[in-house]
Image (cartoon, rainbow, N blue to C red):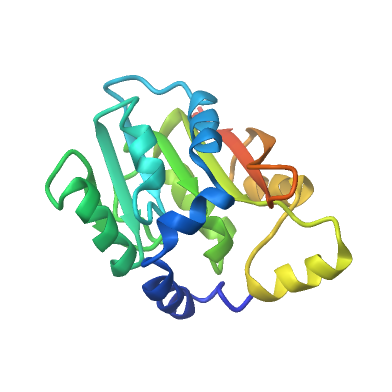
């Protein structure tokens, strides 16, 4: 487990990163990639969308172009403070301080569940993916973006020491263990020299008859 796959360390990390997050983020996950991922989804104007690990609201801004019913959740107060400055505490977005592994929402609640740049900090990613499945309506879409595993052995060792990186095979395992049956992966990249993102779209299965 990487040093940032610890909730307390991750909160401390984002306490400082939140100050420069919006300036650093575009080098790894930019608007073009975000918008490309959003277009992979079928989001209706009345759909209720949950942004898990919303951070400062970078993905939230894009999701608001599709629906006005957006909910954001993050475990970092400092990241949420930045989001409040963009959207207000009581604006279009309903923000919640919370944990991806224990989402404070009812079963079958959302039409779309989104999470970008968050899974790499989850100590128990399968547990959190089960939560994303739980709060999604049967047949709804779940999109998760995380860091693709580096090809270089040297970078792999460095990556493993910091946070969760994973490839398509590992993504298959995690999503299957979380109870998803239908899912697919796309690799996204800001530039040929930047880190790759692995974007997974899954569908919440219908309950067994």
Q: Residue drawn at (36%, 65%), measured in percent from left and top?
A: 75
- Residue that sits furthest to the left in the current view: 90
Q: Is residue 107 left or right of residue 89?
A: right
Residue 108 seen from this side: no
Q: Nearer the viewer, residue 46 or 15?
A: 15
Indicate the position of residue 128 as horizontal and vertical percent values.
50, 56
Indicate the position of residue 108 as horizontal and vertical percent values.
36, 37
Q: Residue drawn at (39%, 46%), measured in percent from left and top?
A: 58
**In this rendering, is residue 31 above or below 161?**
above
Q: Is residue 201 left or right of residue 157?
A: left
Q: Nearer the viewer, residue 118 or 206?
A: 118
Indicate the position of residue 154 as horizontal and vertical percent values.
85, 70
**In this rendering, is residue 160 above or below 192?**
below
Which image quarter is the N terminus in? bottom right
Residue 49 seen from this side: yes
Q: Nearer the viewer, residue 209 or 18?
A: 18
Number of numbered labels in the structure image: 0
Q: Residue drawn at (55%, 69%), measured in percent from left and top?
A: 123
Indicate the position of residue 148 as horizontal and vertical percent values.
71, 51
**Hey, which quadrant is residue 12 in on the image?**
bottom left
Q: Residue drawn at (50%, 27%), measured in percent from left and top?
A: 209
**In this rendering, is residue 78 above or below 174?**
below
């Amino acid at each position: 487990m990487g040093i940032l796959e610890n909730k307390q360390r991750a909160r401390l990390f984002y306490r400082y990163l939140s100050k420069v997050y919006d300036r650093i983020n575009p080098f790894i996950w930019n608007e073009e990639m975000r918008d490309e991922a959003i277009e992979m989804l079928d989001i209706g104007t009345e759909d209720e969308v949950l942004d898990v690990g919303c951070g400062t609201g970078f993905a939230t801004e894009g999701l608001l172009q599709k629906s006005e019913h957006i909910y954001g959740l993050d475990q970092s107060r400092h990241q949420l403070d930045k989001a409040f400055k963009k959207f207000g505490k009581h604006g279009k977005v309903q923000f919640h301080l919370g944990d991806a592994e224990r989402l404070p929402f009812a079963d079958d609640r959302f039409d779309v569940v989104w999470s970008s740049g968050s899974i790499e900090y989850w100590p128990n990613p399968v547990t959190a993916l089960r939560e994303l499945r739980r709060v999604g309506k049967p047949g709804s879409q779940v999109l998760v973006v995380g860091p693709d595993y580096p090809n270089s052995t040297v970078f792999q060792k460095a990556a493993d020491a910091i946070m969760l990186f994973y490839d398509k095979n590992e993504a298959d395992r995690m999503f299957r263990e979380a109870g998803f049956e239908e899912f697919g992966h796309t690799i996204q990249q800001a530039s040929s020299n930047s880190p790759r993102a692995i974007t997974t779209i899954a569908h919440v299965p219908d309950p067994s008859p």
